[in-house]
Each structure stands twice: as C-alpha cells, then as structure tokens.
Image (spheres, helix red, strand yellow):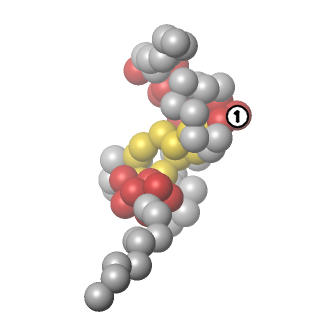
Amino acid sequence: MVKRKRFNQTDLLKRLLDVKPVCKKCGRSARQIQLDLHHKDGVSSNDNWRNIEIYCRACHNDKHETVPKKRKL
C-alpha cells in the first residue's frame, strides 16, 4: 500500500502563487470561494504537481459526477 503524501500549507501556498489560484472550469478565485485539488489521473496517492488541477468545490464535484443508471419501471 502506498502511503499518501500530505500537502503542507507552505508547499501548497507556494504552488498556488506559481499558478493562477482560480478554478480551472469557472474561473472563480481563491478570494471568492474555497478551492480544491483534483488528481487528473484519479490516483489520489499521485501528488505530482503535473497531476494536480485546481477547481472550486462545485466544479470539482461536477468533475467526479457520473451518469445516473437507468432504473427499470
């Protein structure tokens, strides 16, 4: 089992200063709303910065939303 690397606040702030701290989808800034980190490859233990995208909570939830299954009537 791979031990998940935790982001410390200093590293996260440095990274956010290197890129625009805005949601990749809607463009809201960190000053307007809380931002989340999204793992592009879906592997939460892969914390390489090239694998991270920044989304607001709503857009991050949309990113993980799946198409509902059709129910039989």
Q: Can residue 18 be seen in this view?
A: no
- Circle 1 — which element? helix
Residue 64 image position (x, y, % from top left): 47, 55
Residue 7 image position (x, y, % from top left): 46, 20
Question: As displayed, is residue 9 above or below residue 55?
Answer: above
Q: Which residue is drawn at 65% across and 30% down?
A: 49
Task: Name the residue beneath numbered marker 1.
Answer: 50
Counting the numbered discs, the total is 1
Quarter of the figure with the C terminus:
bottom left
- List the single residue furthest toward the front: 72
Q: Which residue is drawn at 34% across and 47% down?
A: 34
Q: Residue at x 50, y 58 (%)?
A: 63
Residue 61 image position (x, y, % from top left): 40, 57
Q: Residue at x 46, y 64 (%)?
A: 66
- List the single residue furthest toward the right: 50
Q: Would residue 40 be found to the left or right of residue 44 on screen?
A: right
Q: Give residue 18's quadrant in the image.
A: top right
Which of the pair 37/2 is nearer the observer? Answer: 2
Question: As displayed, is residue 4 above or below residue 62?
Answer: above
- List the single residue furthest toward the bottom: 73
Q: Give residue 53's quadrant in the image.
A: top right
Callout 1 amino acid: Arg
Which of the pair 12/51 is nearer the observer? Answer: 51
Q: Is residue 8 visible?
A: yes
Question: As displayed, is residue 2 above or below residue 55?
Answer: above
Q: Mark 1: give few (<14), some (14-19) or many (20+) Cα within 10 Å.
A: few
Question: As displayed, is residue 19 above or below residue 32?
Answer: above
